[in-house]
Amino acid sequence: MKPIKIAIAEDNNLLAKSIKEKLDFFNEEIEYKYRAKHGNDLVEKLEKDSDIDVILMDIEMPELDGIKTTQIVNEAYPQIKI
């Protein structure tokens, strides 16, 4: 079974670190790809590497919030689950 590829969109450094630490417990089932600090950051990272299965999305982020980012990602990358 291939691992689920996950990206995190979270502006809070402490929370993002905590989520990644929890995901590391499942290192055979989950592959952590990257973290974005806001919606624009996520969109830029997806343009370079969209080989993602799931995005854990924060709703309240600076520059581009999670709701608008989800709309953009759903249109451009409908195969990614959020």
Image (cartoon, rainbow, N blue to C red):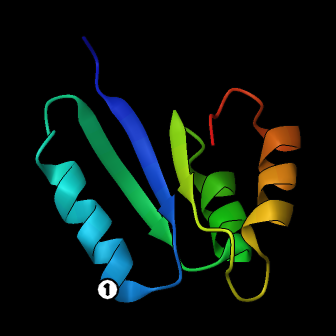
Question: What is the crowding at mark 1: few (fewer than 14 residues within 10 Å), some, or many (at least 20)?
Answer: few
Q: Is residue 38 left or right of residue 53?
A: right
6 left or right, relative to 45: left
Q: Quadrant of the C terminus?
A: top right
- Tell me if residue 52 can be seen: no
Placement of 28 over or under 21, stated as above or below: above
Res 37 → quadrant: bottom right
Residue type at mark 1: give it.
Leu
Q: Find residue 46 and report its horizontal and vertical position in percent.
A: 64, 53
Give the side of residue 16 with respect to residue 67, left or right: left
Q: What residue appears at the point 32 percent right and 50 percent down from the top-left corner?
A: 32
**Residue 6: quadrant of the picture:** top left
In the image, is residue 77 above or below residue 60? above
Q: Residue at x 81, y 41 (%)?
A: 74
In the rendered image, which quarter contains the N terminus? Answer: top left
Residue at (20, 56) in percent of width and height:
22
Residue 27, located in which quarter of the rendered image? top left
Left or right for 26, reference 32: left
Q: Is residue 36 visible?
A: yes
User: Of residues 22 and 34, which is closer to you in this image?
Assistant: 22
Residue holding disc 1:
14
